[in-house]
């Protein structure tokens, strides 16, 4: 045999080779522990509850204020969010969603807002729905998405009620675990709601405190929903609070693609971004993979709702609140669209938060793989979840230079 009589290697001669082999694994492990600490599961959170927890003010100071586009830009380093405690004590209704928000969405609709160009992502359709989507990456903050969906044989009023009806949403949206109305204004229809959403393979669910309001202009509806501060609902370690959230849309009637000249279709222009607490480059991959499935799920829920209401079912309280909205003229909208942009505020925010966005182009492959190791080992013991996590990490490592 070829190796019979071969000398036994000396231990000291082998150590350098072993170190060269083991060192990269230890480095990956350290990076993985670092990323795993950011995404630590509930049992790890409970182990550190006796230690000092960052205050609300220190937490806010780490958030990029670009995604609170109408907050105070007085030059302080922290994000200034409304304090509603005094207004509640005085019995006043705080204006969580105001005309500045209407101006912002009108600029988004007309593409007159401050921001980079939109990049096409998707263009698909079914027999009763067509869908287009775009994405852009601002200098600070998470990726932003814009979509245009046209639903055949659908009225804007039905679409408006469907989006607002949290009670029915619980029946078709399997990611929504809880929906609760915290506050509402019977005069202009403003609502503050709490959502808890399920995240399939992350260790904790996500909690949203959302302010929302509708403006009507003719037969078009400007629907604004965004994350707001609500101190009477304290933060918890689980579910994790999502602060940076913006999801708003314009709903209006358009001509059917049947070619009969009838305005029997409904167009929805959606603008969405949020910071869910995961790396944005990985989130972009997840959105791309799951986007079309989510769109088809919404369409199925909408058709269920259409049949539900046609059967004579009573209007839920949430859907009833969608009927209480503020009227705005076309002239007023045109004026808001042509007023100066919030560029000065955005520039101020960029100066204070320019270092907060992680650069996807500079993330090393070792960091990504190490983070995936920690994520896979702390989130789930199932092989399928690990395969998904490692697959995303591997794909991201290969495409890192192009993202």
Image (cartoon, rainbow, N blue to C red):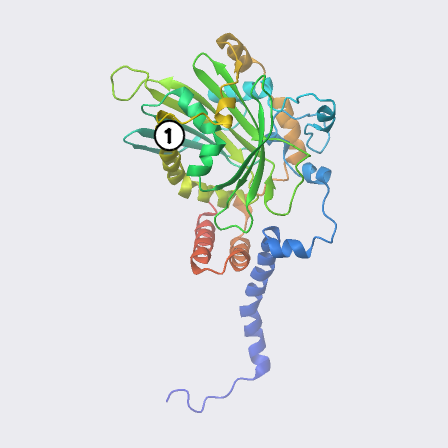
Query: Is residue 94 shown left or right of residue 9?
Result: right
Q: Residue at x 38, y 23 (%)?
A: 267
Viewer-closest of 141 and 311: 311
Q: Quadrant of the N terminus?
A: bottom left
Give the residue at mark 1.
Answer: 308
Label total for image = 1
Q: Residue placed at 68% from the left, 32% from the top?
A: 79
Q: Nearer the viewer, residue 364 or 103?
A: 103
Rendered position, 142 above or below 24: above
Whole-percent x, y for residue 383 in the image: 44, 60
Return the x and y of residue 279 as percentages of the image width and height: 54, 45
The answer to whether one can see residue 380 in this image is yes
Coordinates of residue 48 in the picture (x, y in percent)? 69, 55
User: Which residue does the image show at 68% across and 37% down from the upper left?
Assistant: 60
Give the image quarter of residue 142. top right
Tell me where residue 254 appears, x and y as whole percent.
35, 18
Q: Residue furthest bottom?
A: 5
Q: Could you classify mark 1 by the number of other residues whose Cα lies within 10 Å: few (under 14), some (14-19), or many (20 or more)?
A: few
User: Is 323 left, or right, of 356 in this rendering?
Assistant: left
The correct choice, above or below, for 242 with respect to 340 in the image is: below
The residue shown at (59%, 19%) is 100
Left or right: 334 in relation to 77 = left
**Looking at the image, which is closer to me, 334 or 239?**
239
The reply to whether residue 111 is in sight is no
Q: At numbered mark 1, what does the secondary structure look like: helix, strand or loop?
A: helix
């Amino acid at each position: 045999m070829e190796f019979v009589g071969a000398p036994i290697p000396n231990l000291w001669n082998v150590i350098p080779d072993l170190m060269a082999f083991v060192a990269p694994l230890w480095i990956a492990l350290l990076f993985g522990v670092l990323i795993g600490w950011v995404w630590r599961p509930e049992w790890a959170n409970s182990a550190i509850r006796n230690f000092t927890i960052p205050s609300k003010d220190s937490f806010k100071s780490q958030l990029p204020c670009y995604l609170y586009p109408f907050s105070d830009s007085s030059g302080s380093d922290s994000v200034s969010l409304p304090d509603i405690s005094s207004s509640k004590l005085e019995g006043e209704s705080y204006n969580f969603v105001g005309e500045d928000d209407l101006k912002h969405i009108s600029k988004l609709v007309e593409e007159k807002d401050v921001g980079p160009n939109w990049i096409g992502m998707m263009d698909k359709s079914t027999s009763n729905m067509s869908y287009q989507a775009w994405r852009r990456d601002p200098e600070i903050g998470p990726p932003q998405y814009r979509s245009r969906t046209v639903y055949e044989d659908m009225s804007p009023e039905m679409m408006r009620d469907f989006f607002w009806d949290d009670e029915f949403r619980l029946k078709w949206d399997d990611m929504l675990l809880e929906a609760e109305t915290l506050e509402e204004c019977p005069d202009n229809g403003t609502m503050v709601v709490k959502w808890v959403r399920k995240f399939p393979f992350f260790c904790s669910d996500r909690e949203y405190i959302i302010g929302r309001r509708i403006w009507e202009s003719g037969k078009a509806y400007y629907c604004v929903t965004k994350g707001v501060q609500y101190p009477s609902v304290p933060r918890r370690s689980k579910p994790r609070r999502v602060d940076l959230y913006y999801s708003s849309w314009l709903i209006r009637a358009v001509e059917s693609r049947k070619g009969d000249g009838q305005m029997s279709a409904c167009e929805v222009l959606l603008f969405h971004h949020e910071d869910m607490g995961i790396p944005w480059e990985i989130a972009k991959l997840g959105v791309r993979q799951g986007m079309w499935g989510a769109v088809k799920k919404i369409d199925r829920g909408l058709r269920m709702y259409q049949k539900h209401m046609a059967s004579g079912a009573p209007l839920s309280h949430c859907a009833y609140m969608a009927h209480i909205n503020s009227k705005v003229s076309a002239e007023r909208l045109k004026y808001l669209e042509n007023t100066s942009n919030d560029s000065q505020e955005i520039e101020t925010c960029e100066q204070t938060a320019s270092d907060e966005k992680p650069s996807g182009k500079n993330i090393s492959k070792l960091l990504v793989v190490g983070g995936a190791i920690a994520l896979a080992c702390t989130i789930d013991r199932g092989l399928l979840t690990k395969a998904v996590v490692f697959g995303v990490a591997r794909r991201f490592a290969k495409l890192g230079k192009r993202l």
